[in-house]
Image (cartoon, grey):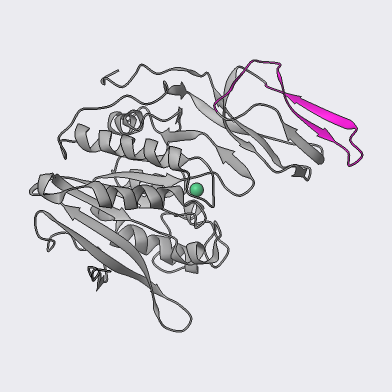
Amino acid sequence: MPSLPSARHVHRVHLDDVSAASLDRQWVHIVNNGLGEPIRVPVVVVRGAEDGPILGLTAAVHGNELNGLAVLQRLIEEVDPAQMRGTIVMALAVNVPGVLLGQRGFNDGADLNRTAPGKPSGTSAEIYIHRVIDRIVSRVELLIDLHTASMGRVNSFYVRANMHNPRAARLARLQNPDIIVHNPPGDTTLRGAASAMGIPSVTAELRDPNKFQADVIAEELLGLRNVLVDLGMIEGRIADGVQQTILCDGSGWMYTDEGGILEVLPQVTQRVRAGETIARVRTIFGDITREWTAPAEAVVVGRSVNPINQTGSRIVHLGWNPRPMPPNGLPA
Ligand SMILES: [Zn+2]
């Protein structure tokens, strides 16, 4: 094996002292663990030959949502800093304790993507996400935060974006997802916190948790390449996706009001009509006790794959008013 390039230890992401046309590996110290040892987020900074936009890419804010990590590793492999303009800042695994535990949440049980922007002093999760934002995310000009569905559920490849923000809308479209859900970011997500700082941000949901999925990894890589081309950071032309993107005005989860053995009928990306049966629940003996129908025409953004359903479980994530988005010539 050749000797591996070393990664330096830093207290906030370094951009200015990264040489032009180079790739720099950094361990960014965020907090200390209970033994007094640093917990560090692995970051790769790719600085192009010329100055230009600073694009931020974050993965695994939820520790078991791993497809984004594979996307970023592939991007590191293929990007040539000498042929690039601007800077890419990739946080490969934001929720380091969660990744190590194979779990969505932080190691105090909190959800980092419901805790942003956090606080300079507060709970472990509040301090952690606050420092991630301060030490890494605040340095970027645009952000794409990479997620997947959570345990027991599967997602389409979809992007949540404020489609009223032209720059966020463009980031969303360029990724050629199956579905774009218009969703204003006024919330406690990383996207919300970055948007509040004036950083146009979108969340990309890359299918399913706890694994690497080659199809969606390749699709998102193509989408990120489109973003880099559109920002003038690399040469090339903007490619259309495999399928036409469906745009929705909003979305929502349906929940069960009766527990039992759950069967969800439509698959992700499938269209459903108002009144169509989309799920049913049986007793343990197999008798159907309840059926649910779609309240309106919709597209299935995500769905439960866990048949064991206590009353109040999630059934299906529906996108409202679905319609085709014109293919990606841009602008719309
Ligand atoms: Zn997530």
Q: Position of residue 38 (x, y in %)?
A: 38, 77
194 left or right of 231 in image: right
Q: Which residues are magenta?
A: 269-294
The quarter of the rendered structure image containing the C terminus is top left
Q: Position of residue 301 (x, y in %)?
A: 55, 31
Residue that appears at 64% across and 33% down:
316
Q: Position of residue 56 (x, y in %)?
A: 28, 49
For this rendering, which residue is in front, 57 or 251?
57
Judge whether 248 appears above or below 64 on screen: above
285 left or right of 56 in image: right
Judge whether 297 appears above or below 225 on screen: above
Judge whether 16 appears above or below 29 on screen: above
186 left or right of 20 in image: right
Find residue 129 and report its image quarter.
bottom left
Residue that appears at 38% across and 66% down:
120
Residue that appears at 26% across and 37% down:
225
